Amino acid sequence: ARRIIQTWLAEQGGHAVGATHVARVLALARGATRGTVAVAGPARVVHEGDLLVHRPGRDAPMTTPIAIPIAIGTTVVLGAWRITLSAPRPRRSGEHRPPDTYTALLDADTLPDTLTVRTPIRGDRMKLLNVGTRRLKSILIDAKIPRESRPTIPMLVANDDIIWIPAIARSPIAAINSTTTRVIEATAEPEG
């Protein structure tokens, strides 16, 4: 096992691999340690699901946040995602929840005028139903989103409040309730 790890690390990074690095990666593979193991390069090995993944650098890549205004009844593309807001429609009988986590139902009459689709900004916080406000970083960690993917996560933002992160979290802001008469469907789908 040690030779396999040493060969794999050398192929990935092209740097001299020390016995300490091999021992740390072996412990990670066996489940004796958690998280990330720094290796020569600089690089790191991350346990993602059932796989060990070699990643360059020791920190998440620095990216500039992207923000795109979105109007009701339009679609925007942010990175690998297509986000669409439908035109307002009457609420259907018995409609309480969206059909899946890639759809959010929004109360058209309580939705703020200024909507944006954007990527995370350091220090973001999100209000969650029955939980209160949490740091976005904690929400993404709990959802097991790899560190490398977090800077590109699309979010629907109303004014300065995050109201929906597709397949991850939904804020109570503009949520449909018993008094809702008009609904806007927000949908997210991978591009291509």
Image: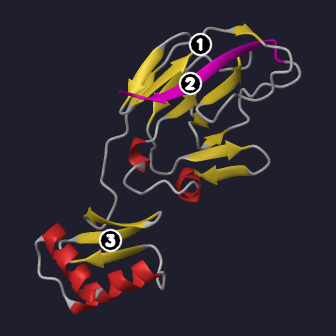
Q: Residues within 10 Å of mark 1 (few under 14, many from 20)?
A: some
Q: Quadrant of residue 181?
A: top right
Dominant secondary-structure state across the stretch colored magenta: strand
Residue 108 seen in the current view:
no
Task: Assign the N terminus to one quadrant of the image.
Answer: bottom left
Q: Measuring 39% from the left and 24% from the top, which residue is drawn there? A: 77
Marks 1,2: beta carbons within 8 A: yes
60 to the left or right of 118: left
- The amino acid marked with disc number 3 is Val
State the image coordinates of residue 175 (x, y, percent, origin top left).
74, 28
Q: Tell me, for residue 45, which label it has, or none.
A: 3
Q: Tell me, for residue 21, which label it has, or none.
A: none
Q: Tell me, for residue 86, which label it has, or none.
A: 1
- The amino acid marked with disc number 2 is Thr
Task: Assign the C terminus to one quadrant of the image.
Answer: top left
Identify whether 172 is placed above or below 126. above
Q: Quadrant of residue 103?
A: top right
State the image coordinates of residue 119 (x, y, percent, origin top left).
43, 38
Q: Earlier in the sequence, mark 1 or mark 2?
A: 1
Q: Tell me, for residue 187, which label it has, or none.
A: 2
Q: Disc 3 to disc 2, how far (Cα)?
A: 34 Å
177 to the left or right of 27: right
Q: Disc 1 to disc 2, how far (Cα)?
A: 8 Å
Q: Measuring 78% from the left and 25% from the top, which residue is drawn there? A: 176
